[in-house]
Image (spheres, grey):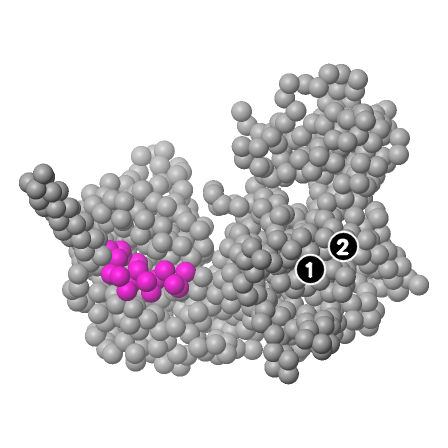
Amino acid sequence: MNGLIEAGVTHPLDKYLRREMIPHIWCTGCGNGVLLNCFIRALRELNLDMDKIVVVSGIGCIGRISGYVNLDSFHTTHGRPIAFATGVKLANPELQVVVISGDGDLFAIGGNHFIHAARRNMDLLVICANNFNYGMTGGQYGPTTPLTARTMTSPYGNIEHPFNLVHLAWASGAVYVARWTAVHVTRLTESIKKALGKKGFRFIEVITPCPEIYGRYNRMGNALEIMKWLRENSVIQHFTDPSKVDIEIGRKIVVGEFVDKEKPVFTDLIADLKRKVKDRLEAESKRTLTKI
Amino acid sequence: MITEQEVIGLNGDEAVAYAAKQCKVDVVAAYPITPQTIIVEKFSEYVANGEVETEFITVESEHSALSACVGASAVGARVFTATAANGLALMHEIVYVASGLRLPIVMVVVNRALSSPINIHCDHGDSMAERDAGWIQIYTEDAQEAYDTVIQGFRIAEDERVLLPVMVMLDGFFISHTLQNVFVLPDETVKKFVGEKRNVPEIEIMGKRVKLKLDPSFPLTIGPLALYDYYHEIKRGQAEAINSSMEIIKKVHDEYSRVSGRKYGDGVLDSYKLEDAEIAIVCIGSAAGTVKSVVNEVREEGLKAGCLRIRVFRPFPADEIRRILSGIPVIGVLDRSLSFGGMGGPLQYEIKVSMYDEPKRPLIMNYAYGLGGRDLPPGTVKKIFYELNKLKGKQKPKETFKFIDVRE
């Protein structure tokens, strides 16, 4: 790779990556690379101003993405990217703030931030790489591990019910909710483009193969076989009732867009409120001055 | 009588899990974090294989992990957990709750540097940040000691005269991930040593003797308000309890060494060739192994060097330290964490305060080393010993605190 850089060979997406950080740390066949690829392709196709985009990530394998994108980025503590991103957005509402993190980070330790940012319709795009386990710490089960799935901490099968992230995002008030897998490259890219063009709390779940850890525990075969499995075991059903798209072993994964609506956005509401209060205070001070 | 023991290859984390298994803990609640993960991972295997009867709770954050431990301990269970760095920082609120409620939880902290920047390797910044939280803090030197100390930890914590949570530290990766031949006691011996079940003490309340735990047969409220009317007294009680735990820590260590044949100094301080020493390094954790080996090396070269490893950091053994270090003219304190804006590392503060009342105060140098997992090679320790040796009989240098092995 470094040889190529010295030879001056470039790729159309190079400007979106910190080339000195490549190769990345992700395992062969991991979906995180696909997600990164789709994300920067979406940026290129929309030709967005790179100085106006901030990527915020948490802890976990996908957390490293903030070091790979050639954008302003923020690698935060475990579970808190949405909280940090909220601060970034409120301090400078001009910025397009994108949170890219994992299922353990966003829905276990950081679950509270997710539901409240969605509830207040914070202007953020949240993309979750869901690999069904805590990959970076060696594959413990987490809040998205399907029932009966094997992990490091559930060698005889998981007995905890997982979140249906699409349903959770819908119930919490997100204005855009979609789910894709790492094999839906074009659709995921289009979905990210669409979400980047909307305002409010937008959520995209990306089902990501974890061939080295989750895949091994569940005997899913090699990276290619998992990709094949994803293609054969997912079905596009746009706008299906979010409560009916749980991910269960032995059942096809329903993907598509589930929510696409408009709702007043927190950043606009707070700007309105500030304006109103300012006008009222100005009017009041004028009245006082007239009385005097 | 020393018990016959099996030797098994375990890394520090596995040794800790093995000890927790033998201590028959009722509840483990934990959350994965490097470099602690192997402990709970290994423990979950014991649970899945039916080797223990422990309730194993996988929670959604460290804050919940220690909260679940507090709840379980309040009903009288024997409770264990483990964490590191940011996980411990997230627990901070509950760390104080556990000690304030006098709950004998044993928690292993696998020392790791705190963010930012993100780092997964060893330094002591995480547990040093909890030094004022009212927990007994014991730092270990290797996997064997980590195993032994967890077992001792339950006995100390659950002693009726102590009733305090115990934090056992091991250096991330240096101990946690390094394989060692560990002597393990037979299950029966450990069971006998710590007791099959936690012994919950009785208190007298409204003229009745009741167990100090949540029990529907005699309802109690745990953790209610105590404002300026009682808070002061409660905190004083806590302070006295941790100070007087020193004797129990030593007694438990002695009793354990009679069973196991292993001793770590007097259980509180581990001194090495200090009897005739003119220069000494004071340190904690795995660095002591390197320092002791360099002591041997420089002694052959004619330096009268020694090492003092602080095993028990809370309660701090100030009197013993004064006795051991008095008469040694030059002392170097190694700190693997910082107190930003302060006058050196946290261990140095404790040592300096301990030596303040000495009629002839030693010259104390302070070295910050190994932050974020940077190695402490023997060559560096040797350099320090020679620097200390040069300072004998000299005036105190202008700077007594320095960073070693650091890029300028």
Q: Are marks 1 and 2 in contact (CB under 8 Å)?
A: yes
Picture coordinates of residue B74 (x, y %)?
Answer: 62, 70
Report the number of numbered marks: 2
Q: Is residue A207 magenta?
A: no
Q: Is residue B209 above or below residue A266?
A: below
Q: Mark 1 vs mark 2: same chain?
A: yes
Q: Secondary structure at mark 2?
A: helix
Image position of A32 (left or right of B279) = left
Q: Is residue A150 visible?
A: yes
**Residue at the (79%, 63%) spot, across then down:** B184
**Disc 1 chain ID:** B
Give the image location of residue A97, x and y in percent: 27, 50
Q: Was residue A111 drawn as part of the magenta stretch in this picture?
A: yes
Amino acid at pointer 1: Leu
Under mark 2, the amino acid is Ser
- Up/down of A54 relative to B41, above or below: above
The residue at the point 89 percent across, 30 percent down is: B276
Residue drawn at point x = 76 percent, y = 44 percent: B317
In front of the other: B161 or A62: B161
- Image quadrant where one finds the N terminus of chain B: bottom right
Give neighbour class at mark 2: few <14, some 14-19, many 20+ (Cα, 10 Å): many
Residues in magenta, as a range: A110-126
Q: Position of residue B227 (x, y in %)?
A: 54, 58
Instruction: Locate residue A70 relative to residue B394 in the image: left or right.
Output: left
State which chain disc 2 sits on: B
As drawn, the residue found furthest toward the bottom would be: B217
Residue ID for mark 2: B245
For label 1, count other residues whose C-alpha is less than 10 Å away and answer few (under 14), some (14-19) or many (20+): many
**Residue B137, placed above or below residue B210:** above
- Residue A194 lies left or right of residue A28; in this view the side is left
| Marking on residue B164 | 1
